Image (cartoon, helix red, strand yellow):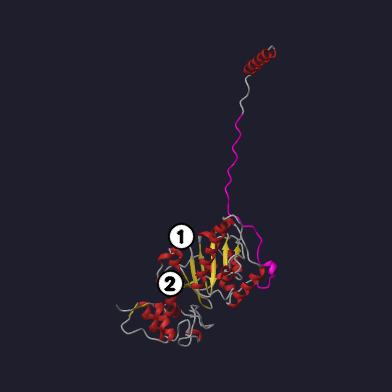
C-alpha cells in the first residue's frame, strides 16, 4: 500500500531537507507545503528564523513555535491574502483544527464554546471563527486578524473573544498561542471561587506554575481583555471567574497541554480531598527547586523571588459536604381541660386506694 504523506509530515521532511519516498501519495495540503520552497517571501516557521533541523541523527525535540522576522507583516490586501494562503499558515490552520477536535473530544468545550489563537506576526494572529463547534472545524474556517481585533482575511467572522487572547499577547511577548475552554473540573473551581491549592504535584508546579485568577468581566469586552491580560502577563494558566480557563504557550500544542494539565490537576485535587486524610504538601524548598526547573525551561514564574516559606499555601481545601437539616419540631396540641380534670380525678382515686391497703 502506498504511503500517504500529510502536511505535518511534509513540513518535517522539509526541515530535514528530505524528499517523500518514491511512490508516496501527497495530500493537497502536503503538496502545498512542499511547493512552498519556491515561495521565498513566506518561508516555513523554521526557515524564517534561520533555524532548521538538528544535525542528522542528533536527538532533538519538536519545535512548533511559529517565528517571523520583526517588521515583516504583509501590508497590502494582496500581500495579506497571499500570506493567509501560504503553506506555512495552512499548516497552522490544520493544527488549530486538530487542537479543536481534541478540546471537543475531552469535553473541554460544548456547543460553540472555546476559542484558539496563534500569533503569526508583529500585529497578526490566526483565530477560530465565532459560532462553530471546535470539534468540526476546517482550515478554511480560520480567520486572520490584527491584535486590535480587526479582521483581515477569512470568510467567517472571527471569535468575539479574540480580544481576551490579545490582551495577554500584547502584554507578554512569549505568549505565541492562547487556548480558551471550559474544562469541567477547572471551571468548577472558577465558578465556586475556590483557590487551587499548590505544592501537591511536581508536574503542575513545573508546567502550570502559579495559577492566576481573573475577576469576572463580561466575555468578549475590552474590560475582560484588560483584566485577563494583566493576570495572564505573569501566569500561563488563568481561571476566569464564573467563566472558564485560558492558557498560553510558545505554540498551540504547548498551550493545549496546559489546558489538559490544569483540568487533570483540579480533578486530582478534588478526588484526593475527598479521601478524608487531608492534602499532603511538599516543602517550600522543594517548590523552589521546581520553580528553578521551570525557569530553566524558559517559562516565567512570578514566585521566583519569593522566600521558601511563602511558596506553599496553607489553605485547607475540602470538598463540599451536604448536611441534613434538623427535623422541625412537631407542633404541640393544646390540652383539653375536661380531659385533664378526669385524669386528675382518676389519679387521686388510685392513690387513695393504694394508701388504704
Query: Which residue is painted at 61% across and 72% down in the image?
Result: 290
Residue at disc 2, secondary structure = loop
CA gap, disc 2 to disc 1?
24 Å
Main SS, magenta region, reads loop
Instruction: Name which quarter of the figure residue 104 lies in.
Output: bottom left
Query: Which residue is painted at 42% across and 65% down in the image?
Result: 135
Residue at disc 1, secondary structure = loop
- Judging by the rendered image, the residue that carries numbered circle 1 is 110
Of the numbered discs 2 and 1, the one sitting upstream in the chain is 1
Q: In the rendered view, would you say 89 is above or below 204?
A: below
Is 93 within the magenta?
no
Q: Is residue 280 left or right of residue 86?
A: right
User: Which residue is at the front of the view, 84 or 93?
Assistant: 93
Q: Callout 1: few (<14), some (14-19), or many (20+) C-alpha neighbours within 10 Å? A: some
Q: Callout 2: few (<14), some (14-19), or many (20+) C-alpha neighbours within 10 Å? A: some
Magenta stretch?
Answer: 304-331
- Asked whether the beta carbons under mark 2 and mark 1 sit within 8 Å of each other, the answer is no
Image spot of residue 66 (x, y percent):
49, 78
- Judging by the rendered image, the residue that carries numbered circle 2 is 154
In the image, which disc is placed on residue 136? Answer: none
Q: Is residue 145 left or right of residue 278?
A: left
Amino acid at each position: 500500500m502506498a504511503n500517504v504523506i500529510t502536511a505535518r509530515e511534509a513540513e518535517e521532511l522539509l526541515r530535514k531537507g528530505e524528499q517523500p519516498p518514491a511512490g508516496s501519495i501527497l495530500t493537497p495540503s502536503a503538496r502545498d507545503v512542499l511547493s512552498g520552497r519556491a515561495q521565498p517571501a513566506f518561508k516555513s516557521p523554521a526557515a524564517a528564523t534561520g533555524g532548521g533541523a538538528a544535525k542528522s541523527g542528533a536527538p532533538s525535540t519538536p519545535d512548533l513555535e511559529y517565528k517571523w522576522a520583526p517588521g515583516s507583516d504583509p501590508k497590502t490586501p494582496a500581500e495579506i491574502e497571499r500570506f493567509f494562503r501560504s503553506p506555512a499558515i495552512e499548516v497552522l490552520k490544520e493544527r488549530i483544527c486538530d487542537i479543536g477536535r481534541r478540546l471537543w473530544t475531552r469535553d473541554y468545550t460544548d456547543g460553540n464554546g472555546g476559542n484558539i489563537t496563534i500569533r503569526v506576526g508583529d500585529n497578526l494572529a490566526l483565530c477560530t471563527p465565532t459560532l462553530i463547534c471546535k470539534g468540526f472545524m476546517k482550515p478554511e474556517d480560520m480567520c486572520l486578524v490584527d491584535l486590535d481585533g480587526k479582521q483581515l482575511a477569512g470568510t467567517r467572522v472571527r471569535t468575539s473573544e479574540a480580544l481576551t487572547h490579545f490582551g495577554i499577547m500584547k502584554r507578554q511577548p512569549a505568549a505565541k498561542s492562547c487556548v480558551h475552554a471550559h474544562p469541567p473540573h477547572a471551571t468548577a473551581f472558577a465558578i465556586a471561587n475556590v483557590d487551587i491549592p499548590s505544592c501537591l504535584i511536581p508536574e503542575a508546579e513545573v508546567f502550570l506554575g502559579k495559577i492566576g485568577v481573573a475577576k469576572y468581566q463580561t466575555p468578549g469586552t475590552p474590560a475582560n481583555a484588560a483584566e485577563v491580560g494583566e493576570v495572564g502577563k505573569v501566569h500561563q494558566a488563568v481561571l476566569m471567574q464564573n467563566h472558564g480557563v485560558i492558557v498560553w504557550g510558545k505554540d498551540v500544542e504547548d498551550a493545549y497541554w496546559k489546558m489538559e494539565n490544569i483540568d487533570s490537576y483540579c480533578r486530582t485535587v478534588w478526588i484526593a480531598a475527598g479521601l478524608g486524610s487531608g492534602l499532603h504538601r511538599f516543602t517550600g524548598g522543594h517548590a523552589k527547586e521546581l520553580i528553578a526547573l521551570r525557569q530553566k525551561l524558559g517559562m516565567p514564574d512570578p514566585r521566583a523571588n519569593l522566600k521558601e516559606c511563602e511558596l506553599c499555601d496553607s489553605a485547607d481545601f475540602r470538598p463540599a459536604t451536604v448536611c441534613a437539616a434538623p427535623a422541625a419540631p412537631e407542633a404541640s396540641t393544646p390540652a383539653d381541660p375536661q380531659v385533664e380534670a378526669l385524669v386528675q380525678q382518676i389519679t387521686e382515686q388510685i392513690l387513695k386506694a393504694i394508701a388504704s391497703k
